Amino acid sequence: MRELALHLMDIAENSVAARAKTIHIDVEEDQAADRLWMCVRDDGCGMDAEMVRRVCDPFVTSRTTRKVGLGIPLLKAAAEACNGYLRIESEPGVGTQLEVLFQRSHIDRMPLGNIASTWFALLISHPEVHWVFRHKMDAAEFVFDDAPVKETLGDVPLTEPDILAYLRETLESGVSEVQKVAIV
Amino acid sequence: MTTIKSLEDLKKLREQALQKREVKRTEGQAQVIVGMGTCGIAAGARETMKAVLDTIEQEGLSGIIVTQTGCIGLCEKEPIMQVVVGEGEKVVYGKVSPDVARQIMHDHVLNGKVVENHVIHV
């Protein structure tokens, strides 16, 4: 994967596979503290401690454990190569939280990539999920909660052309506003 | 370009969409499914999905269902896209770059003509 945004998409698909009703995706950058922190939090089926250990290890993952594979170990390795970490907290029946930290300026740190595009694709392809997206850089913050949008739309699907344009523009402009405060 | 943001704007768009839908409802419904497993995402499925959505937006195509599926075990053929138009057969496409996705949207979804050179038989 070439972008952290693609990793986020992959992690979020795990949450969908865990039958989550609500999924939060947070991306926080702090330039002074030199941190890039991302978190995917769901209320899906959750995992026991043994499963959490297994999803971090590519060599014990078998094909029958369908919702896990190389995605998490790859992201974990990327974070650890950048003075960061990947942590999973999970409880069966409650949900899972995966957080990952990078030293923002680290030479090996993958670019964040197109976060608006990741959110747009997730939002459209899983309309049954309640999505809450948050992107923060220093004091600038953009939050997109799809609940009011879906309530307003009622039975009109998100894939109607004018609605797609509305959602794409909302996400793109929100993310680019936040990224304006980036120094590098 | 002016950015539309408020929920009031969205309400208006909803009304417009409902009116358009009444007009177009007679056409057979089309379903587009993009593979979004780790393998699909790594191979560029997000851009494939984006090309599908951009085509819908730019061409003003109403009533198309866009969804995703996980890994279907053909990782080497990713990005994979499945298309069903109306009562027709399901067609599975492999190596669907954004350009190919746009071609499939035009030829198959809009005009019912299968893009043979990208079909994979499963």
Image (cartoon, helix red, strand yellow):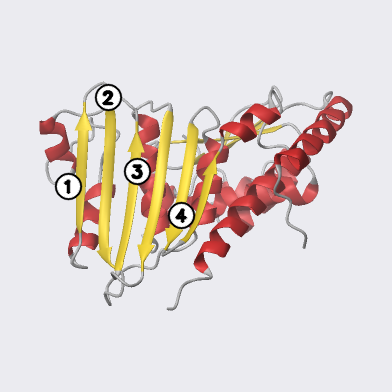
- Earlier-in-chain disc, 2 versus 1: 1
Marks 4 and 1: in contact by CB < 8 Å?
A: no
- Earlier-in-chain disc, 4 versus 2: 2
| Circle 1 residue | A58
State the count of labels.
4
- On the image, the x and y values in percent for residue A89 come to 20, 38
Chain of the residue under the numbered disc 2 shown in the image: A
**Both labels 3 and 4 in a single chain:** yes
Residue A135 is labelled as 4
The image shows residue B48, relative to residue A66, as above or below, that is: below
**Both labels 2 and 3 in a single chain:** yes
- On the image, the x and y values in percent for residue A130 come to 49, 31
Marks 2 and 1, how far apart in space? 25 Å
Q: Amino acid at mark 3?
A: Val
| Circle 2 residue | A94
- Earlier-in-chain disc, 2 versus 3: 3
